[in-house]
Image: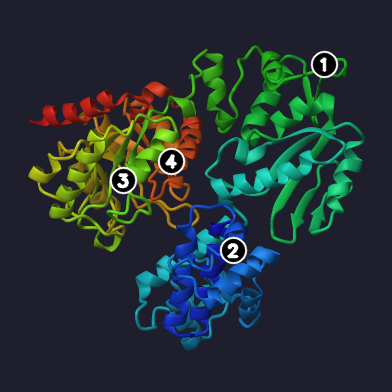
Amino acid sequence: MDPRTAAHTLTRIAAFLELRGESTFKCRAYEQAARSLVALDTDDLGALDRDGALARTPGLGKATLSVVRDLIETGESRYLAELQAGLPPGMTDLLRVPGLAISKVHLLHEQLGIDSVDALEAAARDGRLASVKGFGAKTAARILRGIEIFRASGTLSLYHRGAQQAHTLLAAVQAHPDVRRAEIAGAVRRHCETVGAAEIVAACSGDPHAVAASFARAPGVRTVTLEDTASPSITFMDGAQLNLHCVHDADFAVALWRHTGSATHVDTMRALLAREGITLHADAVRDSRGGSLGIATEAALYHLVNLPFIHPEMREEGNEFLLAVAGKLPTLLEVHDIRGALHCHTTWSDGKASIAEMAEAARVRGWSYIGITDHSQAAFYAGGLTRDRVLQQHDEIDALNAAAPGVRILKGIEADILADGALDYDADLLDRFDFVVGSVHSRFAMDRQRMTERVLRALDDPYLTVLGHPTGRLLLSRDPYPIDMDAVLEKAGAVRVAVELNADPKRLDLDWRLLSRAKALGVAIEIGPDAHSTMGLDNMTIGVGMARKAGIEAGDVLNARSVDEVLAFARARRAAQH
């Protein structure tokens, strides 16, 4: 049992306890225990329990430790199951509606008897919700939008969770004795922001239908559709979903291609093949006489229509074919092109690791520099730094750099872009940083014109190096705030401010569709892990995958440059404005 899964269970228990009206102290005990588990540097809580270290973990009490041990032993929590059983079934769904805090769910249940999303929607539409103290018409409208997001998301999950689930299922498929090879396809292979069911293609040594049937009838399966085919859709008892495509080994390449590309990509390719007298039939291609063409690789399939290989991440909207025909497919960014990270938090604000620990983690990942960007003072809720604490942090960074840790530590800050467009801190203090990331963290409800003007004013500040998570979206939770990104990107290109692809899987902001526009305008892209722990630095890999979807190359990325080039970029920005 890993710490994050256990922490998630404890957090859910805290939520259910609050819904039941339990004491704040009891609820907070489970939340604190969850935070303590996340801070542990291990992937195996069972090992910690066996040597007694788990029981000594600060923040874990008798009750919470009992829940964790239940998870270690059985993979489930009997206490959580009891809490769920004692609530109306629809109450759990209310917890997933963006913008509806647990305290509000409890209040609405008490005052209006709301116990489901349908009941919540009815109350929001007929005016009852707006009549409750602390709500009002605007809040009711926001909750209606949250309900839309909840319903639209369905069984979607964030990329990193979907990818993890897909790899777990892939291992099970590969272990089948009649599976020669198997690969993940679909949205995970295309590196989409959110994913649904895992798509896996398996090449079989025997009858593909028989292999598929063995998975469809396996223990732990809850439901199966298309059960009598070689491509069943399987839902397991824990909610995991698998679309399994079993094929003969000779059809593997075509099947992998077909189940990877979007519908637009596949249909476009089908039309191009038809022009050559070639038919795409299920997971095979046939010539004009109906003969099967042996296709050993995906590259060979594209070669049939005189096109170069199109990378999986780009197989989305059809524009990739225009680039391929014109011979302008980009040389996509690779993980090894990244030379440093420029958006990282430490224990100085709301991070979990020290500066030294983050620097060492950067060195382990092969990077030559790391930018420390703790929150500025306006973000008091996240431990934002006062002027005095900034100066103290700079002294620590100087000392660490002098000790030659092997990684250059840069003095950065994530400065709040205030409501009037000014950056948090005065010019004298901003001038002490090597670079500045500016982000909007408040007043999201501004209209499109005011929000755009706010960010455009920030771009005029000579100390702004990078515009952080430019649209403020939280995937499956919060829409982007209204903003004219065309105007912002044009201005960023003109004044030479980089824009961020925030690689936190909850954000992935700027959207990859807008990244291609930024590239066309010559805007430098900074891929920021927004890391709040050493493990958070691995968000960089997710960010690189998202950049590849937009056709981003190494030359487009600020942190694919050397540390001297990054510093020169920041200095040039300031010099041009003086």
88 lies left or right of 386:
right
Disc marking residue 355: 3
Nearer the N terminus, badge 4 or badge 3? 3
Alpha-carbon neighbours of circle 1 within 10 Å: few (<14), some, or many (≥20)? some
Residue 113 vs residue 51, the one in the foreground: 51
Work out whether 228 lies above or below 65. above
**Residue marked by disc 2:** 49
Task: Measure how far apart labels 4 and 3 are at the Cα level.
Answer: 29 Å
Mark 1 residue type? Asp
Q: Are marks 2 and 4 in contact (CB under 8 Å)?
A: no
Q: Do the residues labelled 2 and 3 touch (CB within 8 Å)?
A: no
Work out whether 37 lies above or below 299. below
**Residue marked by disc 4:** 511
Task: Measure how far apart labels 1 and 3 are at the Cα level.
Answer: 61 Å
Determine the secondary structure under disc 1.
loop
Q: Do the residues labelled 2 and 1 touch (CB within 8 Å)?
A: no
Determine the secondary structure under disc 2.
helix
Question: Would residue 325 be visible to someone looking at this image?
Answer: yes
Looking at the rendering, which quadrant does residue 443 occupy? bottom left
Nearer the N terminus, badge 1 or badge 3? 1
